[in-house]
């Protein structure tokens, strides 16, 4: 299926974020067509509640997608999460076991977040990690051009704005 417009398909995933001592978990909701991070949360646990909150925030800010894709993690297969999708009439799409390519756009985001932000720092605490990652995700959405979007930013693609071109 071709996904060419905002809010057609959203995806969500969780990754761990190393800190100076320990780690936290980062969850994001990403629009597939535009690569825009619609909502995100950090948590010290991998419980489903922070994933549900992230999804609720994305829907409150951006409406709802037709299709929502995740892996088969317990946070995404439980009734709290799937019930929220079903009660909003959102089709549920889940990746095959071990099929990381099914969610390649979020996996690519993780690479960018980690190599351009996380691995360059050693966060001392959760609030420092939250503030720094928040600044990076604002940069990612609003100022980081994407080759796959014809050098537009995710914000430009999501809100259908023409890319800003610098003069030579």
Image (tube, rainbow, N blue to C red):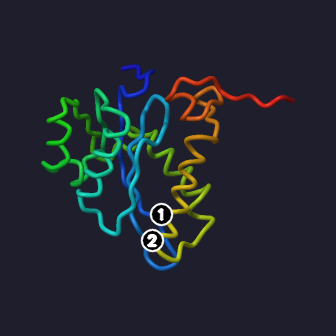
Tell me the number on the disc at residue 130.
1
Residue shown at the point (37%, 35%) measured from the top left: 62
Please state, as top left, top right, bottom left or bottom right, where the N terminus lies in the image. top left
In terms of depth relative to the viewer, which is nearer, 12 or 64? 64
Q: Secondary structure at mark 1?
A: helix
**Marks 2 and 1 close (CB-CB < 8 Å):** yes
How many numbered badges does the structure rendering display?
Answer: 2
Tell me the number on the disc at residue 12.
none
Q: How many C-alpha atoms fall within 10 Å of the one at disc 2: few (<14), some, or many (≥20)?
A: some
Q: Residue furthest front?
A: 60
Residue shown at the point (30%, 32%) measured from the top left: 64
Q: Is residue 4 above or below residue 22?
A: above
Residue shown at the point (22%, 30%) measured from the top left: 91
Residue shown at the point (49%, 36%) measured from the top left: 35
Q: Secondary structure at mark 2?
A: helix
From the image, tell me which residue sits under label 2: 126
In terms of depth relative to the viewer, which is nearer, 59 or 32? 59
User: What x and y, as percent, mark residue 4?
Assistant: 45, 21
In terms of depth relative to the viewer, which is nearer, 109 or 39? 39
User: What x and y, as percent, mark residue 148?
Assistant: 58, 30
Please state, as top left, top right, bottom left or bottom right, where the C terminus lies in the image. top right
Q: How many C-alpha atoms fall within 10 Å of the one at disc 1: few (<14), some, or many (≥20)?
A: some
User: What x and y, as percent, mark residue 70?
Assistant: 30, 42
Where is residue 74, by image quadrant? bottom left
User: What x and y, as percent, mark residue 33?
Assistant: 46, 28
Q: Is residue 73 above or below residue 42?
A: above
Distance in Å between CA atoms under marks 2 and 1: 6 Å
């Amino acid at each position: 299926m071709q996904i060419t417009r905002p809010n057609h398909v959203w995806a969500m995933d969780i990754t761990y974020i190393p800190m100076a001592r320990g780690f936290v978990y980062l969850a994001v909701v990403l629009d597939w067509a535009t690569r825009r991070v619609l909502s995100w949360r950090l948590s010290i646990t991998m419980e489903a509640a922070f994933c549900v909150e992230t999804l609720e925030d994305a829907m409150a800010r951006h409406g709802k997608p037709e299709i929502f894709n995740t892996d088969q993690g317990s946070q995404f297969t439980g009734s709290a999460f799937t019930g929220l999708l079903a009660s909003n009439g959102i089709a549920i799409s889940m990746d095959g076991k071990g099929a990381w390519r099914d969610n390649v756009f979020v996996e690519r985001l993780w690479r960018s977040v980690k190599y351009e932000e996380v691995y360059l720092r050693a966060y001392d605490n959760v609030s420092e990690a939250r503030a720094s990652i928040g600044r990076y995700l604002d940069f990612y959405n609003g100022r980081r051009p994407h080759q796959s979007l014809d050098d537009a930013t995710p914000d430009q693609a999501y809100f259908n704005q023409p890319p800003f071109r610098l003069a030579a």
